[in-house]
Image (tube, rainbow, N blue to C red):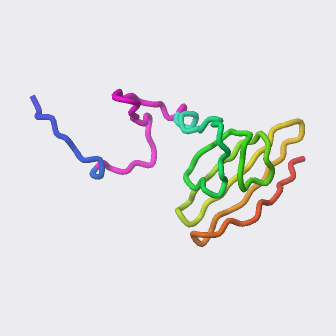
Amino acid sequence: MAEKQDIPMNQFPIWSSMDYVYVERGNSQGKVHKSNFLSALVLGNKNEPYDCNEIKSGCIIGSSKWINAPVNTIAILETIPYSEDWIIQRFSVPGSTLRLFTRSFYNGSTWSEWKSVNIT
């Protein structure tokens, strides 16, 4: 029988595609299929407002309380990083007429102004 090896995580190979992502919750481990992975990353409506300027890691947040947002109403914020210095945010307001705003983070310290995108 082959001897079990404990490999440090920083020595794992880097892959650009996968079938499953292995996760941990409490003291239990499991796997999430790639088709469900994004929904596992969605952050939920918490009671405190989210500060859009502080959200720089890739995520999707649904909330009705915002700071540094184009409007303070129920909306979905998508944050998409290319690197720590270059990030895009999309802010979608649902309703009979969808309102969409976008902005970018650049030079490692500057958020652009929110721009309204018209959808017809």
**In-front residue for pair 23/25:** 25
Q: Is residue 91 magenta?
A: no
Instruction: Give the image quarter of residue 30.
Output: top left
- Count the marks: how many? 0
12 horizontally vs 109: left or right: left
> What range is drawn magenta here?
12-36
Q: Residue at x 61, y 60 (%)?
A: 87
Query: Residue shown at 65%/69% (left/top)?
Result: 110
Q: Residue at x 43, y 36 (%)?
A: 21
Q: Position of residue 73 (x, y in %)?
A: 79, 43
Residue at the spot x=37%, y=51% of the render? Answer: 14
Q: Is residue 109 left or right of residue 77?
A: left
**Residue 13: percent from left, percent from top:** 32, 49
Q: Position of residue 48 (x, y in %)?
A: 65, 42
In the rendered structure, the answer to whether residue 7 lies left or right of residue 58 reads: left
Q: Quadrant of residue 62?
A: top right
**Quarter of the figure that contains the N terminus:** top left
The residue positioned farthest toward the front in the image shown? 48
Residue 78 drawn above or below residue 2: below
Please tell me whether residue 17 is drawn above or below residue 40 in the rendered image. Answer: below
Residue at the far bottom: name it: 107
Q: Is residue 15 magenta?
A: yes
Picture coordinates of residue 114, whole percent (x, y): 77, 60
